[in-house]
């Protein structure tokens, strides 16, 4: 059997195709000037380029939620969906972040603010920040995101004390070549290109050259008798600039360290001691532009655990954000252009929020809340992504396992409803979109009430997805150890319960509350397990179709104040109210809501008829559930539930039929047997209590 082995030639070609064609090409300043007139966007500032990046990879608008979902997060096209994000609140946070960047792109103020991502541990803020940096790298490597900088050449020909090693010097701040033009001439070019620009913003650039470049420009202009054209033609080359986090070019991350090992030069740069002997300490050529703000110029500065920095460090952020400059020690100020993003957790934020000495810093931040996910199915998708990206053992995750784990997480995060008509689990279901049209649940009102009750915001406290994901992983390995090739909700519950008190981020005051939430989740799973078994034991498509048709005949007669033909006698009779209610009560519909439901299904049937579709109760989820439950009620007295718990008390053929029916619902064979026994025991217990 032949193998399609990769060859070095093929790998090399594939790599070369990913590299911009002009990456190593040099051009003249006049070439760049013409490029500006052809494509003004190459001179965008950092906020404008990042804003366009989000739109470039695609977006969709959720009109109901009023939220734009950006595909770099919702689809992750660069990595085949490996790093997708789930949950309405997360996409709301991203939408808010992008809106602030886009406002900054228009010069409305946020360009002078720190975008502070605030959230509890494991809420996704760091992953989102990392995703933005990854996509910025990719975007700047494409034609749509291209940008350029410059380098000085042949310096030793004119500047006689120039170190031969510095004959060619790249712009230390990777500045846009536009800064080489004096402001008056630059403004003329900018006015021209803005007239051709097709964008919601205008190109702006009032930056000064960095001190080293300004030194070279002054010396060269003096040599050429202020002939700017001669300077630019003889000593400047234009080169492509592609952001690269690993090379600290256009993207920089900064994190707090021990105060003894960190000083402000890590942000602003320091003296280049190897050059002092050559140029002297006060010479701008002897400065090392290796500070984090210097490296991030033209791109993104990412501050990890920003509020853990000492107050003295945070002062540097005041100038960097508001004035868009940095002031290295004993050196001139340096203009910067970057999107400054900070991340912080809740304890540090609470501490700094109440500090009067932090008022100026707080005023220069735009807080963007990154709460935990509040939709348990979206939370389940996070765990599913975790499993999808791992080397998962040969094990089947049974139905409801991840959803119930997600429900537990959500219950720990949402505020208890200030409304006796709805409990905590019902609220979680409402957030998940499980609201019947006839139910009087106002999700928007629930959210507003919760925001008033919460300390900072709903979802900013609770159990993190990391904890639950870790316990799912432990439950998988435990199942494998016990030779179980399936992971069930019951096993997962046991691991969650057994390790709650071993998790360092869960305070003791929450233990009893979280144990109570686990019991609520167990109860919810019990109902779902019984529903699955009910579906397996009593499911009869022909009978459900017949009962559905009968129900609709009586509903139509009820609405039209007409009679219906009796199935046995053939005589006309009044609609069978007892039969109608026997179906509707399976949905817990009260007497005063029956008319709403009947009108609802009547409209549904009429709409399908107009579209040429035949009546099928399977296509209406609420009606199907009601009919299934009624059929279950009619049949359950003929089922020996105690026998479900023990295979020795049941006919093998009959049991296998039920197992097969559960397998069709997504269970493994062993998982089907477990849920049969579990649900059978629960139903038998309730039957005895009745």
Image (cartoon, rainbow, N blue to C red):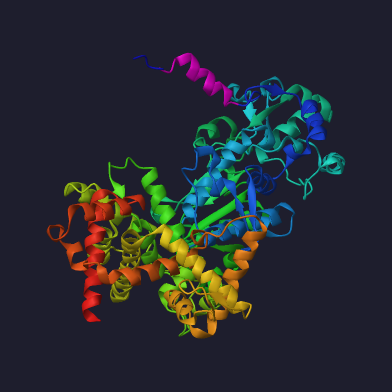
Name the quarter where the N terminus is drawn: top left
Q: Which residue is located at x 36 percent, y 59 percent?
A: 400
Residues drawn in magenta: 5-19
Relative placement, left or right, of 33 versus 412 is right
Q: Is residue 349 shown to the viewer in this render? A: yes
Kindly give the residue lying farthest to the left in the view shown. Answer: 648
Work out whether residue 79 or residue 194 is closer to the camera in this orientation and state it: 79
Q: Which residue is located at x 69 percent, y 54 percent?
A: 102
Work out whether residue 99 or residue 540 is closer to the camera in this orientation and state it: 540
The secondary structure that dominates the magenta segment is helix
Q: Which residue is located at x 60 percent, y 65 percent?
A: 604
Locate residue 590, reporting x and y percent: 48, 83
Q: Is residue 442 shown to the viewer in this render? A: no
Q: How many marks?
A: 0
Residue 380 picture quarter: bottom left
Q: Can residue 263 be found in the magenta stretch?
A: no
Locate residue 600, reporting x and y percent: 59, 71
Locate residue 303, reporting x and y percent: 51, 52
Q: Can residue 13 be found in the magenta stretch?
A: yes
Q: Which residue is located at x 77 percent, y 29 percent?
A: 32
Relative placement, left or right, of 481 versus 185 is left
Work out whether residue 305 or residue 660 is closer to the camera in this orientation and state it: 660
Name the quarter where the C terminus is drawn: bottom left
- Above or below, 285 relative to 334: above
Locate residue 490, reporting x and y percent: 26, 61
């Amino acid at each position: 059997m032949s193998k399609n082995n990769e060859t070095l030639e093929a790998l090399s070609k594939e790599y070369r195709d990913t590299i911009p064609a002009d990456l190593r090409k040099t051009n003249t300043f006049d070439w760049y000037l013409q490029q500006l007139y052809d494509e003004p966007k190459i001179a965008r500032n950092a906020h404008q380029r990042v804003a366009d990046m989000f739109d470039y990879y695609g977006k969709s608008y959720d009109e109901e939620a009023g939220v734009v979902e950006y595909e770099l997060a919702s689809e992750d096209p660069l990595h085949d969906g490996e790093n997708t994000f789930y949950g309405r609140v997360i996409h709301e946070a991203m939408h808010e972040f992008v809106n602030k960047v886009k406002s900054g792109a228009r010069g409305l103020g946020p360009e002078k603010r720190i975008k502070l991502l605030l959230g509890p541990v494991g809420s996704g803020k760091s992953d989102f920040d990392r995703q933005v940096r990854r996509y910025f790298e990719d975007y700047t490597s494409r034609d749509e995101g291209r940008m350029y900088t410059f380098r000085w050449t042949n310096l030793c020909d004119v500047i006689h004390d120039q170190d031969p090693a510095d004959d060619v010097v790249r712009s230390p701040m990777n500045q846009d070549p536009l800064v080489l033009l004096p402001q008056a001439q630059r403004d003329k070019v900018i006015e021209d290109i803005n007239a051709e620009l097709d964008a919601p913003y205008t190109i702006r650039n009032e930056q000064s050259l960095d001190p080293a470049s300004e030194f070279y420009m002054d010396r060269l202009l003096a040599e050429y008798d202020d002939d700017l054209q001669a300077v630019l033609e003889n000593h400047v080359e234009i080169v492509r600039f592609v952001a690269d986090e690993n090379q600290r070019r256009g993207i920089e991350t900064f994190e707090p360290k021990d105060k003894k090992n960190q000083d402000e030069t890590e942000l602003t740069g320091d003296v280049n001691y190897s050059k002092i002997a050559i140029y002297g300490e006060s010479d701008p050529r002897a400065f090392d532009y290796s500070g984090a703000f210097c490296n991030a110029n033209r791109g993104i500065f990412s501050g990890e655990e920003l509020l853990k920095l000492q107050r003295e460090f945070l002062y540097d952020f005041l100038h960097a954000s508001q004035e868009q400059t940095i002031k290295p020690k004993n050196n001139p100020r340096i203009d910067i252009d970057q999107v400054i993003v900070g991340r912080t957790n809740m304890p540090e934020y609470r501490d700094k929020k109440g500090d009067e000495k932090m008022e100026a810093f707080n005023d220069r931040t735009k807080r963007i809340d990154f709460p935990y996910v509040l939709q348990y199915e979206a939370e389940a998708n996070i765990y599913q992504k975790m499993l999808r990206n791992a080397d998962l053992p040969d094990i089947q995750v049974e139905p409801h396992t991840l959803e119930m784990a997600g429900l537990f997480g959500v219950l720990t995060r949402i505020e208890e409803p200030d409304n006796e008509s709805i409990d905590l689990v019902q609220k979680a279901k409402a957030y998940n979109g499980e609201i019947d049209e006839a139910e009087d649940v106002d999700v928007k009102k629930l959210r507003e009430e919760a925001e008033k009750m919460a300390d900072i915001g709903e979802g900013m406290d609770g159990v993190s997805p990391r904890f639950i994901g870790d316990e799912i992983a432990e439950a998988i390995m435990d199942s494998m150890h016990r030779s179980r090739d399936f992971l069930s909700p019951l096993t997962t519950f046991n691991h969650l319960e057994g390790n709650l008190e071993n998790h360092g981020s869960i305070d003791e005051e929450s233990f009893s509350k979280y144990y109570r939430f686990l019991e609520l989740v167990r109860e919810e799973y019990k109902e779902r397990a019984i529903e699955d078994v009910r579906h397996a034991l009593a499911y009869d498509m022909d009978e459900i179709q017949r009962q559905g048709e009968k129900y609709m005949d009586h509903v139509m007669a009820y609405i039209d104040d007409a009679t219906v033909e009796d199935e046995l006698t053939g005589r006309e009779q009044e609609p069978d109210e007892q039969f109608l209610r026997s179906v509707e009560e399976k949905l817990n519909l009260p007497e005063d809501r029956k008319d709403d439901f009947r009108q609802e299904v009547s409209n549904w049937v009429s709409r399908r008829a107009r579209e040429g579709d035949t009546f099928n109760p399977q296509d209406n989820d609420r009606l199907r559930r009601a009919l299934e439950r009624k059929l279950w009620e009619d049949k359950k007295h003929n089922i020996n539930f105690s026998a479900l718990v023990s295979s020795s008390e049941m006919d093998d053929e009959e049991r296998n039929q039920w197992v097969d029916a559960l397998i069709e619902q997504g269970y493994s064979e062993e998982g089907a047997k477990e849920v049969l026994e579990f649900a059978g025991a629960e139903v038998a217990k309730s039957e005895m209590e009745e």
